[in-house]
Every structure is written in C-alpha cells, then in structure tokens.
C-alpha cells in the first residue's frame, strides 16, 4: 500500500509539472526596460516664419532617418521614454529658393501612459519635453548662419502590437514645439518656427 501510494503521488506530480511550467511561462516577469529601433519622418510646419523684418519667407523640407527609443516602465501603465536618433539634415528655402541647410538633433523625453499593457494591441499617449540642437548650419552665399538651440513641449500618441512577451511592432506620432532665433553674420535676423510632426515606425524588445 505505501508503494502504490508513492507511485500514484509521483505520477500525479509528473502530470502537474508541465502544467505548472506553462503557467510560469505565461506569467513571465519582465524587466522594466524596453528598446525600440525604427525610422522617423520629420515634417516641419508648412510655413516656418519670416526673417529680415518679415520680408523673407522661410520653409524647411521634410526628412526621414533612423531613430531609437529607450523606455523604462515605472509601473505596468506608466513609462518614461527617450526618443533619439542621428542628426537629421534639412534643406532651407527662402522665398521659394534654396538658401542653405542645417542638421538638428531633436531628442524628446516623455512620460507615457499605456492603456492596456497586457493586451495584444497596446495604445498609449505621452507628454514630454523636446530639446533641439542645431549643427552644421550653412548658407549658399557663404554667410555665417547660426540657429539657437530650442526647448519646447511635445505630445505623443501611439500603438504597439505584441508579437510575444518580448517583441513588439509599433507606430506613433509626435508633435514638438521648436522655435529658433536666427543670426546671420552675427546679427539677429528673426525667428523660425519648425514645430514638426514626427511619424515613426519601429520594432521593440522588452527585456
């Protein structure tokens, strides 16, 4: 009788073990860190302002390039997210003619709220701060161009699709307030509003 009881107990344990292992896999505890890599399209507002006492209209073209995100989940719903990338190069037009170019780095730090973090489809929104540094400013006529760095608010809305516990594909759209003062040959020339909408698609991994 003791042997039969022992055999029955062992057999029951073998049957329960795979079920327990599956449950543990389904409830996997994930790291709070997430990284994303993708492509972003920066679309400045259609009219970026006027310089030289509003006599010269300035427009800045669209530009796409690689981007990345680093996210940290404070709770299942709340996360801090940093958007970064390589410097984006934009062409500058004045009164419809090509006048120069500039590069800028527009990192955005956001606080995000994820509505359904455990679902397959995971919508989220974000509110953040944008810092933009302009580099390699050039004018075609050889004049010295300087664009002042900019701080401003940023808004975000996005959607992730979970492929499994770790991998996601996603898309989001952001609006950033970017205003810069223009100096040409050391003299103030006016203000330019870039104020881009940023469209991104990405692949993400949650550790």
Image: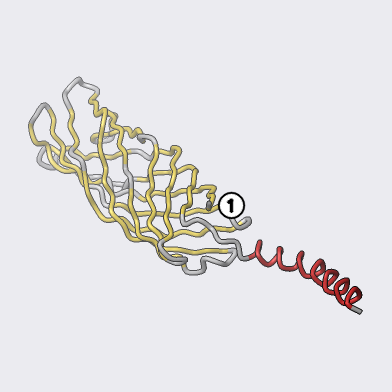
Residue 204 versus residue 9 in the image, above or below: above
In this figure, which colouring scheme has been used for the structure?
secondary structure
Number of marks: 1
Question: Would you call the spot at circle 1 few (<14 residues within 10 Å), some (14-19), or many (20 or more)?
Answer: some
Report the quarter where the N terminus lies: bottom right
Quadrant in which residue 146 is drawn: top left
Residue 163, given in percent of the width and then of the height, sits at 63, 55
The residue at the far top in this view is 142
Quadrant in which residue 92 is drawn: top left
Residue 28 versus residue 191 in the image, above or below: below
The residue at the far front in this view is 2
Q: Residue at x 38, y 57 (%)?
A: 80
Q: Residue at x 26, y 31 (%)?
A: 135
Residue 75, given in percent of the width and then of the height, sits at 43, 65
The residue at the far bottom in this view is 1
Residue 62, given in percent of the width and then of the height, sits at 38, 40
Residue 105 versus residue 166 in the image, above or below: above
Q: Residue at x 24, y 29 (%)?
A: 137
Q: Secondary structure at mark 1?
A: strand
Q: Is residue 15 left or right of residue 205?
A: right
Q: Which residue is tagged 1? A: 167
* Of 187 and 112, the residue lying toward us: 112
Q: Is residue 185 left or right of residue 89?
A: left
* Of 7 and 32, the residue lying toward us: 7
Residue 192, given in percent of the width and then of the height, sits at 20, 43
Q: Residue at x 25, y 45 (%)?
A: 48
């Amino acid at each position: 009788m003791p042997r039969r009881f022992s055999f029955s107990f062992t057999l029951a344990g073998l049957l329960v073990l795979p079920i327990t292992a599956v449950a543990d896999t389904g409830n996997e505890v994930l790291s709070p860190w997430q990284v994303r890599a993708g492509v972003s399209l920066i679309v400045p507002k259609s009219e970026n302002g006027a310089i030289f006492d509003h006599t010269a209209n300035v427009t800045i073209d669209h530009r796409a390039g690689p981007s990345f995100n680093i996210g940290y989940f404070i709770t299942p719903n709340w996360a801090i997210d940093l958007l970064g990338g390589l410097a984006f190069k934009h062409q500058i037009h004045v009164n419809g003619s090509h006048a120069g170019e500039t590069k800028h780095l527009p990192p955005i730090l956001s606080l995000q709220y994820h509505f359904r973090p455990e679902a397959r489809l995971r919508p989220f929104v974000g509110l953040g701060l944008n810092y933009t540094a302009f580099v390699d400013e050039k004018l075609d006529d050889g004049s010295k161009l300087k664009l002042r760095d900019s701080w401003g608010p940023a808004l975000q809305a996005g959607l992730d699709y979970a492929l499994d516990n770790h991998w996601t594909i996603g898309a989001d759209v952001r609006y950033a307030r970017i205003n810069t003062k223009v100096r040409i040959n050391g003299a103030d020339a006016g203000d330019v509003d870039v104020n881009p909408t940023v469209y991104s698609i990405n692949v993400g991994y949650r550790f």
